[in-house]
Protein backbone atom coordinates (compact mmCIF):
# COMPACT_ATOMS: atom_id res chain seq x y z
CA UNK A 1 0.00 0.00 0.00
CA UNK A 2 1.41 3.39 -1.01
CA UNK A 3 1.88 6.12 1.58
CA UNK A 4 -0.19 9.28 1.90
CA UNK A 5 0.93 12.28 -0.15
CA UNK A 6 1.64 15.35 2.00
CA UNK A 7 1.36 18.80 0.43
CA UNK A 8 1.84 22.21 2.04
CA UNK A 9 -1.34 24.28 2.18
CA UNK A 10 0.66 27.15 0.67
CA UNK A 11 1.27 25.05 -2.44
CA UNK A 12 -2.30 23.81 -2.83
CA UNK A 13 -4.77 24.58 -5.54
CA UNK A 14 -8.41 24.30 -4.49
CA UNK A 15 -9.44 22.88 -7.86
CA UNK A 16 -6.84 20.15 -7.61
CA UNK A 17 -8.03 19.18 -4.12
CA UNK A 18 -11.62 19.22 -5.41
CA UNK A 19 -10.55 16.86 -8.21
CA UNK A 20 -8.92 14.52 -5.67
CA UNK A 21 -12.13 14.46 -3.65
CA UNK A 22 -14.19 13.82 -6.78
CA UNK A 23 -11.97 10.84 -7.57
CA UNK A 24 -12.94 9.29 -4.22
CA UNK A 25 -9.91 10.39 -2.19
CA UNK A 26 -9.93 10.91 1.57
CA UNK A 27 -8.11 14.17 2.33
CA UNK A 28 -6.90 15.69 5.61
CA UNK A 29 -7.44 19.45 5.46
CA UNK A 30 -6.66 22.37 7.76
CA UNK A 31 -9.54 24.48 9.03
CA UNK A 32 -9.55 27.67 11.09
CA UNK A 33 -9.84 25.38 14.12
CA UNK A 34 -8.59 21.74 14.05
CA UNK A 35 -7.66 19.38 11.20
CA UNK A 36 -10.53 17.84 9.30
CA UNK A 37 -11.02 14.72 7.17
CA UNK A 38 -12.89 15.38 3.93
CA UNK A 39 -14.66 13.32 1.30
CA UNK A 40 -17.14 14.11 -1.45
CA UNK A 41 -20.81 13.51 -0.65
CA UNK A 42 -22.89 10.80 -2.23
CA UNK A 43 -20.14 8.21 -2.73
CA UNK A 44 -20.88 5.00 -0.82
CA UNK A 45 -17.28 3.76 -0.88
CA UNK A 46 -15.93 7.08 0.43
CA UNK A 47 -18.58 7.13 3.16
CA UNK A 48 -17.69 3.61 4.26
CA UNK A 49 -14.02 4.49 4.24
CA UNK A 50 -14.33 7.62 6.40
CA UNK A 51 -16.25 5.73 9.09
CA UNK A 52 -13.60 2.99 9.05
CA UNK A 53 -10.75 5.52 9.22
CA UNK A 54 -12.27 7.10 12.31
CA UNK A 55 -13.78 3.99 13.87
CA UNK A 56 -16.92 6.14 14.02
CA UNK A 57 -20.40 4.65 14.53
CA UNK A 58 -22.53 5.04 11.41
CA UNK A 59 -25.32 6.77 13.33
CA UNK A 60 -23.02 9.81 13.77
CA UNK A 61 -23.79 11.94 10.72
CA UNK A 62 -21.05 13.90 8.96
CA UNK A 63 -21.01 17.73 8.85
CA UNK A 64 -21.15 19.62 5.56
CA UNK A 65 -18.86 22.47 4.46
CA UNK A 66 -20.18 25.10 2.06
CA UNK A 67 -18.27 27.68 0.07
CA UNK A 68 -21.06 30.27 -0.11
CA UNK A 69 -24.36 30.81 1.67
CA UNK A 70 -26.11 30.41 -1.68
CA UNK A 71 -25.21 26.70 -1.53
CA UNK A 72 -27.68 26.23 1.34
CA UNK A 73 -30.48 26.25 -1.22
CA UNK A 74 -29.17 23.14 -2.99
CA UNK A 75 -28.92 21.35 0.36
CA UNK A 76 -32.56 22.16 1.12
CA UNK A 77 -32.13 23.28 4.72
CA UNK A 78 -34.50 25.44 6.74
CA UNK A 79 -32.39 28.59 7.02
CA UNK A 80 -34.65 30.13 9.66
CA UNK A 81 -34.49 33.54 11.32
CA UNK A 82 -32.21 32.44 14.17
CA UNK A 83 -29.85 30.73 11.72
CA UNK A 84 -29.76 33.86 9.56
CA UNK A 85 -28.95 36.11 12.52
CA UNK A 86 -26.16 33.82 13.70
CA UNK A 87 -24.77 33.47 10.18
CA UNK A 88 -24.77 37.23 9.66
CA UNK A 89 -22.74 37.64 12.85
CA UNK A 90 -20.36 34.66 12.75
CA UNK A 91 -20.12 33.35 9.16
CA UNK A 92 -17.64 32.78 7.68
CA UNK A 93 -16.12 31.52 10.90
CA UNK A 94 -15.86 28.73 13.47
CA UNK A 95 -19.59 28.24 14.04
CA UNK A 96 -21.40 25.07 13.02
CA UNK A 97 -25.15 25.48 12.57
CA UNK A 98 -27.35 22.38 12.81
CA UNK A 99 -30.44 22.91 10.67
CA UNK A 100 -33.53 20.95 9.74
CA UNK A 101 -34.88 20.70 6.21
CA UNK A 102 -37.36 23.05 4.60
CA UNK A 103 -40.71 21.66 3.47
CA UNK A 104 -41.32 21.12 -0.23
CA UNK A 105 -37.67 21.32 -1.19
CA UNK A 106 -35.55 18.78 -3.00
CA UNK A 107 -32.58 17.77 -0.91
CA UNK A 108 -29.65 15.78 -2.38
CA UNK A 109 -29.95 12.00 -2.34
CA UNK A 110 -27.02 11.80 0.09
CA UNK A 111 -29.08 13.68 2.69
CA UNK A 112 -32.24 11.59 2.35
CA UNK A 113 -33.47 10.10 5.60
CA UNK A 114 -31.80 12.71 7.82
CA UNK A 115 -33.80 15.09 10.01
CA UNK A 116 -30.96 17.60 10.38
CA UNK A 117 -27.53 18.47 9.04
CA UNK A 118 -24.58 20.36 10.55
CA UNK A 119 -23.26 23.11 8.28
CA UNK A 120 -19.90 24.91 8.37
CA UNK A 121 -19.11 28.05 6.37
CA UNK A 122 -15.43 28.32 7.32
CA UNK A 123 -13.23 31.36 7.59
CA UNK A 124 -10.36 29.53 5.84
CA UNK A 125 -10.38 30.59 2.19
CA UNK A 126 -8.95 27.28 0.94
CA UNK A 127 -11.90 25.31 2.35
CA UNK A 128 -14.45 27.70 0.89
CA UNK A 129 -12.74 27.58 -2.50
CA UNK A 130 -12.81 23.76 -2.50
CA UNK A 131 -16.53 23.76 -1.74
CA UNK A 132 -17.11 26.33 -4.48
CA UNK A 133 -15.07 24.31 -6.99
CA UNK A 134 -16.93 21.02 -6.50
CA UNK A 135 -19.97 21.82 -4.38
CA UNK A 136 -20.48 21.12 -0.66
CA UNK A 137 -18.14 18.57 0.91
CA UNK A 138 -18.36 16.32 3.95
CA UNK A 139 -15.83 17.17 6.65
CA UNK A 140 -15.35 15.64 10.09
CA UNK A 141 -12.49 16.03 12.56
CA UNK A 142 -9.35 14.15 11.52
CA UNK A 143 -8.91 11.84 14.48
CA UNK A 144 -10.03 8.42 15.59
CA UNK A 145 -13.45 8.47 17.23
CA UNK A 146 -13.05 9.53 20.84
CA UNK A 147 -9.32 10.27 20.48
CA UNK A 148 -9.57 14.06 20.61
CA UNK A 149 -9.07 16.60 17.86
CA UNK A 150 -5.64 17.23 16.31
CA UNK A 151 -3.77 20.47 15.64
CA UNK A 152 -0.82 19.00 13.70
CA UNK A 153 -1.29 17.33 10.31
CA UNK A 154 0.95 14.31 10.88
CA UNK A 155 -0.66 13.65 14.27
CA UNK A 156 -4.08 13.76 12.65
CA UNK A 157 -2.97 11.18 10.08
CA UNK A 158 -1.41 8.94 12.72
CA UNK A 159 -4.57 9.05 14.83
CA UNK A 160 -6.70 7.49 12.10
CA UNK A 161 -7.20 3.76 11.69
CA UNK A 162 -5.79 3.58 8.19
CA UNK A 163 -4.13 5.61 5.44
CA UNK A 164 -5.63 8.68 3.80
CA UNK A 165 -4.75 9.65 0.24
CA UNK A 166 -3.66 13.25 0.79
CA UNK A 167 -2.57 15.35 3.76
CA UNK A 168 -2.73 19.12 3.34
CA UNK A 169 -0.36 20.55 5.94
CA UNK A 170 -1.42 23.97 7.19
CA UNK A 171 0.97 24.08 10.16
CA UNK A 172 -0.03 23.98 13.82
CA UNK A 173 -3.67 24.95 14.30
CA UNK A 174 -5.75 25.99 17.30
CA UNK A 175 -6.96 23.22 19.65
CA UNK A 176 -10.40 24.80 20.00
CA UNK A 177 -13.08 23.26 17.74
CA UNK A 178 -16.04 25.11 16.28
CA UNK A 179 -19.04 25.96 18.42
CA UNK A 180 -22.14 23.94 17.47
CA UNK A 181 -25.62 25.48 17.75
CA UNK A 182 -28.78 23.59 16.79
CA UNK A 183 -31.29 26.05 15.36
CA UNK A 184 -34.10 23.50 14.97
CA UNK A 185 -35.18 24.40 18.49
CA UNK A 186 -36.52 27.59 20.02
CA UNK A 187 -34.46 28.84 21.72
CA UNK A 188 -31.58 27.38 19.74
CA UNK A 189 -29.44 24.90 21.66
CA UNK A 190 -25.69 25.10 22.15
CA UNK A 191 -24.54 21.52 21.52
CA UNK A 192 -20.80 22.12 21.84
CA UNK A 193 -18.83 25.02 23.26
CA UNK A 194 -15.91 26.10 21.12
CA UNK A 195 -14.31 29.02 19.32
CA UNK A 196 -17.49 31.14 19.50
CA UNK A 197 -17.95 31.41 23.27
CA UNK A 198 -20.77 32.56 25.53
CA UNK A 199 -19.50 36.13 25.64
CA UNK A 200 -19.74 36.27 21.84
CA UNK A 201 -23.31 34.96 22.06
CA UNK A 202 -24.38 37.35 24.83
CA UNK A 203 -26.85 39.33 22.69
CA UNK A 204 -28.43 36.14 21.31
CA UNK A 205 -28.80 34.64 24.78
CA UNK A 206 -30.27 37.82 26.25
CA UNK A 207 -32.79 38.08 23.41
CA UNK A 208 -33.86 34.47 23.95
CA UNK A 209 -32.78 33.33 20.48
CA UNK A 210 -30.13 31.01 21.94
CA UNK A 211 -30.38 29.14 25.23
CA UNK A 212 -27.42 29.32 27.61
CA UNK A 213 -25.82 25.98 28.39
Image (cartoon, helix red, strand yellow):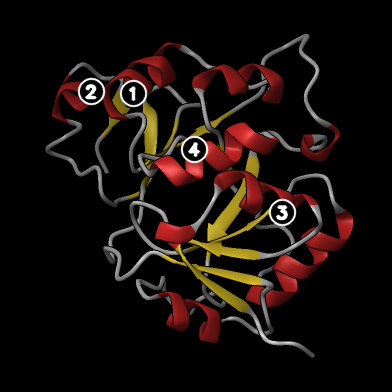
* Residue topped by disc 4: 128
Query: Which residue corresponds to the image point at 49% horizontal and 45% vertical from the top-left?
Result: 127
Callout in the foreground (2, 3): 3
**Are the residues tagged 1 and 3 within 8 Å (C-beta)?**
no
Question: What is the quadrant of residue 165 in the picture?
Answer: bottom right
Give the SS element for disc 2.
helix
Q: CA distance from mark 4 to mark 3?
A: 14 Å
Considering only order in the chain, which callout, 4 or 1, is on the residue closer to the N terminus? 1
* Residue topped by disc 2: 204
Q: Measuring from the top left, give residue 99's x and y in whole percent.
A: 55, 29
Question: What is the quadrant of residue 87 in the picture?
Answer: top left
Q: CA distance from mark 1 to mark 4?
A: 18 Å
Q: CA distance from mark 2 to mark 1?
A: 8 Å
* Residue topped by disc 1: 86
Considering only order in the chain, which callout, 1 or 2, is on the residue closer to the N terminus? 1
Q: Measuring from the top left, give residue 84's x and y in whole percent.
A: 41, 15
Give the SS element for disc 1.
helix
* Residue topped by disc 3: 21
Q: Measuring from the top left, give residue 41's x and y in whole percent.
A: 75, 45
Q: Quadrant of the C terminus?
A: top left
Considering only order in the chain, which callout, 2 or 4, is on the residue closer to the N terminus? 4
Count of numbered tags: 4
Considering only order in the chain, which callout, 3 or 4, is on the residue closer to the N terminus? 3
Amino acid sequence: MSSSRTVSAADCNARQIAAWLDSGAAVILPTETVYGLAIKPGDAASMQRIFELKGRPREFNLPVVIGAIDQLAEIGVDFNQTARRLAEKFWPGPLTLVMGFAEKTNRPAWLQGRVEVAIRFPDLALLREIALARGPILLTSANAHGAGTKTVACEAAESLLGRVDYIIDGGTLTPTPSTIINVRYSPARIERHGAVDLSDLKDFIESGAVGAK
